[in-house]
Amino acid sequence: MKVLLPEGVELQGFERELKTTLEQAQLAGYALMGFAFREAFGSSLHQIDALLVMEPGVFVCLEAKGYKGKWTGSANETWFSDNKKIEAVGGNPYIQVERYSLVIKDKLRSCIFQDIPFWVNYFVVAPDTTKFEIEGAVINTFQAGRSVQICHVSKIQQVLGSIRTKENVAAKFNEVGIKKIISELTGISLEKIERLINVQPPDHTTVKLPVESPKLKPVGTTVEPPPKKDTIPVGTTVEPPHNKYIHFSKILSCFVVVGAGIFAILYYFNQTLCETATETRVNSICYKDITKKPLIVGIVTSPKQYSEFKTYLKKQLGSQAIDVVVEGNSEITYKEAQNNISTNKWDIVFANSPMNGMRAKDNSYKWLVRMFPKYLLSYQSALFVISDSSIKSIKDIKSTTTIALGDFNSASSFYMPTYDLYGKSMTVTAGHRSSKIRELVANKQADIGAVVYTTIKDDPQFRVIQISREIPGTGVYLSPKLTPTVQKQIQNILENAPKKIKEQANYDIGKEPDYKQFRTIALRVDQVLSCANFSRNPVQFFCNATSQGILGRVAGFTNQGNGTIRLRLERENHKTCQVFVSSQTLNKITDGSSPEIINRKQVNIIGVEPIELEEGTCQLTIENPTQLVVLQPGA
């Protein structure tokens, strides 16, 4: 098998061992390592450890994890190696590599196998000394379908060699050609692919000469004198004596020519321009160039709070950043903030809320430092009333009771109170800031309010009637669109900032919060919200049996042509549905305006009667954007 690497990429550690194993494998095809793959209809990039494109039509994603010891976990849980967390995008290596396989499948479906069912397989690869106690995992063997498949590195050839493909897939594969397919996957031209394939990797132990070495006689051998003149036939050319220096110069010239050619090819690849002039290419990946475009700091509070931080950051970056801009204010909604995160518009995000923090994590932002360092790692929300209110607990709430809630994406003033009020029906006024909520309750314009517990617990004019579960804190996050060098530099600048700067910007070094439990609560609330109508009072904080809808997860999509998108919905009962929706309708769905955005998210389909098909599948058509509700906006 031939391993292809982008120019300048040098693999380290376990990935290097995987590369060597693949190079030695007797398999027909190519292993693409070190490449970043862009989504079929989006701009997000995914760095896959190894994508194997093998004849006659086998595709495999490999995720290399060099953790030695005993692995534990399951398909939906965090994995550990001897009690040390195995770092992975999305939760665990299985979820990570499965996601990559869907990215590649969507890419291939969009450009090669439009009407042909096919599969992109995936494995997690581990060192040979690793032992596994992963629940339900298939070890060192291939099993078709969705399963947790793990392979020791030495078993790669054995496992991959057992994978078969279908005749129609093989026929299409051969028709298009393996090099054309690699070109479509990587976005690199066929000419460049040819050059990559033909560039021989350097061998640091042996130099293979490009010409045959001269056969010199051993030292001490007598050189026979040339024949006498009278014995040389007429017209015969006398060859000059062998000169080893002439041969050496030829060899040296060949090396110079070959070396210059290789250098020219590598230089050509490195100079390939990105799609926009404000991006720069590093190791085949395009990043934002902050020498050409301002570094954006995103906030949801007063810009005055970050004035000195902005000055400090701009001074530290110097000429490396054309400018530093603080964007946002105390009036911006969390929805707007989360859209700026999803589109990578904000380079540095002061999340201020776990809802924004989860959105940053789900869009591959990097954790930097903790916000609210003077407080505990978690906090609580509270439902409160004015001190002389007749309401003693949430049991006293009626449909005529008015509650003041915060932004629809606020953890403390919306999500947690909605969770605690499950099953209730009441009058709602929402979209308020914390100060406004306190004002409404104080003036008796609202019977109940929802805010952070610590903001009202010592206020004598209010009385708390309900305290929520723990809410995880949040922090400052860094965009994946910045180069690794810039990311590291900004991290050092923030960590080593003067104490005064940290206090004003409300951050300091600290532990990253775990959002796992809060995600469960948020998902439950999203399910309720998909049924609730906040434009009409009283609002029901529950779903009627007839309005539960069809719950499931979008697991892939196909562009049917004529503006129609087909979504594959995996339901909670393990059955699947084919969901048809026009791109025009999809564009109007909140948090699901394109197939790439809605893919892999939990959704609820309401008011649509499915057509039951054979083998437990169903089919339905979305005609109105209100019929499809995204339950995991940041997933």
Image (cartoon, rainbow, N blue to C red):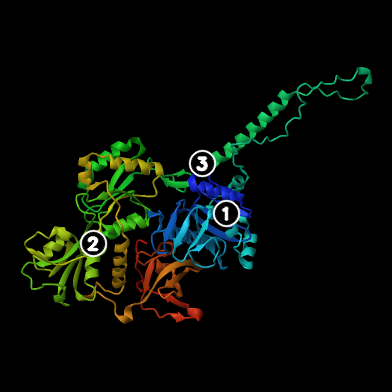
Can the viewer see residue 179?
A: no
The kind of residue tagged 3 is Gly
The kind of residue tagged 1 is Ile
* Residue 167, quarter of picture: bottom right
Q: Position of residue 210 (x, y in %)?
A: 68, 36
> In screen coordinates, is 508 left or right of 554?
left
306 or 57, which lies in front?
57
- The residue that mark 1 highlights is 182
> In screen coordinates, is 376 left or right of 477?
left
> In screen coordinates, is 209 left or right of 226?
left
Select label 2 or label 3 by which is in front.
2
Q: Position of residue 570 (x, y in %)?
A: 44, 71
Secondary structure at badge 2 equals loop
Q: Which mark is residue 8?
A: 3
**Number of other residues with Cα within 10 Å of mark 3, as a class: few under 14, some 14 to 19, many 20 or more:** some
- The residue that mark 2 highlights is 470
Question: Which residue is depicted at the point 50% across and 48% down?
Answer: 15
Select label 1 or label 3 by which is in front.
3
In the rendered view, tell whether residue 611 sits above or below residue 377.
below
In the rendered view, tell whether residue 219 sits above or below residue 357.
above
Q: Position of residue 565 (x, y in %)?
A: 47, 69
Secondary structure at badge 3 equals loop
Give whichever of discs 2 and 1 has the lower sequence position.
1
The number of callouts visible is 3
Q: Position of residue 8 (x, y in %)?
A: 51, 41
* Residue 384, quarter of picture: bottom left
Per the model, the C-alpha gap separating discs 1 and 3 is: 19 Å
Per the model, the C-alpha gap separating discs 2 and 1 is: 48 Å
Give whichever of discs 2 and 3 has the lower sequence position.
3
